[in-house]
Amino acid sequence: MMPNNNQSDESKNSSKDVDMPTNEDGRESPESSESDELASSSEGELFGKRRRVGTPVSSPFKTPPGSPFKMPMTIPSPSPPQWISLDELMTVSNGVTNMALAHEIAVDSDFRLQKYMPPENSLEKQVKETVHRAFWDALREELAEEPPTFQHAINLLGEVKEMLVSILLPQHSRLRAQINEVLDLDLIAQEAEHGALDVKRCARFVIDTMGRLCAPVRDQDIETLREVDEVVNMFKEIFRVLELMKMDMANFTIQSMRPTIQQHSVEYERKKFQEFIDKQPNALEVTKTWLYQASEEVKGSHLPSGQSDGAAAANGAVTPMDVLGHAYIMLLKWEENKPFPETVLMDQGRLAEIGVKCRQITLIASILLITHNVVGAALAGLQEFSEKLKGTLGVLLGDMQESSFNVEEALKNISEQVCKEVDECLETRGFPRLDEKRREILKVQVQGAASPDNTIHNLITSRVYGFIQSVITAPNPASQAKVPGGLTSVKIDLFETTARVLRIVRHNNAVFGPYYTDIISGLLPAANGPSE
């Protein structure tokens, strides 16, 4: 019997992220201007109605000695250990898996199931290839006997029949009856017993049926399959193409159901997460730590000299929106090995990718600003030069997602390329090339563009993250965000990146807003009334 390739049905989501925001019902807007892309939910939309959830909020760590901040609440004693059965564990695991799948479909409009392929040179791949090779060799030997043996072939036709039926739609009643008639396993077994079974005829029928069912993208595969003449190779290709057709059908189903999934995903994810919390009462500990740290940083930045955090909150200096907006910006700069908040765990990969994109935008804008500052008036107003240099920088910094990427080495190469392109531009406009002194200044400043002590880099970094935060915390959904100075040359990339963050923020707040409200209200008690 053909080995069941269960791995082929496993899926992984594509690496693309959604670049456009969604409506309140989760569906992608058919038309969006730049201002619509950058529109944010109001404070009420972000936080929703208050709802008490689980245990009271506690500060995850003690106030450092000498800290000007007061602890917002006391730390309860640790919860006693709890036992969980294997059945409960599997139920929770399945619930989390289903929640993650619904989340991916709702958030990522480019989500596609893909056929699982074992890693190259892995033991899994070697075992799989060995087992499959043994099966096909056994089939070839059976068909070569005199008289031929058809046991493997009959089992194979049974699996092919099941796969064909699985991709039929409800309206394919006539085709379903035809498949059941031609691939009647009882009749095929009788034909094999009397030596009258024509395996190739059955295979041709299967190929013709596949041609009627397949998506246009598989037409070339079907044509190639028709040219195969040897029976065993024909069945090998039939199984390969059928696996692709099953994946096509699954993705078609996802695409058809996406609007419905998006409409109900918020309630479904929140329900599944609450079930998870019911089984694991401490499931929000990292989220509480994350929001506590965000609130402390925000209160610290809002405090005038000599003013306490309670007085600042009472005067409206710190709002829940400030805390949550800053908390999301923290995620874009999250340390790789640091525990990620539970409520945004499903978006960890996307947020990490967006964080790298933010750093790339910051470096490109910093280098462009450095170049114009060093060279001076000769490059003033040359939009074409800026666009060309930005494109070059994008290519040279394109591998920032890779863990092996070395920023210092990349900046050395970039400094040489910047000097080269500046010289070419100056010569084209009739100006002399850079002298040695100015060339060395330009190279040194470009090579230090990523340094934590670099003033320009720090300024651009602050403006990039400040722009994103201003959008995701904007009180008016229709408000337009002004591009900060120094970022005009990268505004398109900045808009697209901000739109990606905005979509994650909207969906995440729609699902977990009640939990955030409950936690932050405990961190900012004075925000709900006068301080006693």
Image (tube, rainbow, N blue to C red):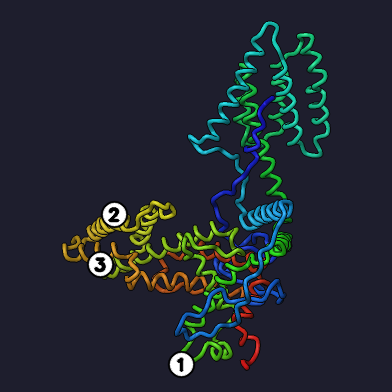
Few, some or many residues within 10 Å of mark 1 (<14, 14–19, 20+): few
Q: Is residue 174 visible?
A: yes
Name the quadrant containing residue 75: bottom right
Mark 3 or 2, nearer chain start:
3
Mark 1 or 2, nearer chain start:
1
Residue at image position (42%, 52%) is: 402
Give 52 or 394, whichever is nearer the viewer.
Answer: 52
Q: Which type of secondary structure does the marked residue at label 2 adopt?
A: helix
Q: CA distance from mark 1 to mark 2?
A: 48 Å
Few, some or many residues within 10 Å of mark 3 (<14, 14–19, 20+): some
Q: Amino acid at mark 1?
A: Gly
Residue at image position (58%, 76%) is: 59
Q: Is residue 503 visible?
A: no
Single out the residue that lies furthest toward the front.
80
Q: Label 3, on which residue?
A: 375
Give 475 or 123, whichever is nearer the viewer.
Answer: 123
- Is residue 28 depicted above or below 76 in this figure? above
Q: CA distance from mark 3 to mark 2?
A: 19 Å
Give 416 or 50, whichever is nearer the viewer.
Answer: 50
Instruction: Please tell me the numbered disc located at residue 426.
Output: none
Q: Label 1, on which residue?
A: 306
Residue at image position (35%, 60%) is: 384
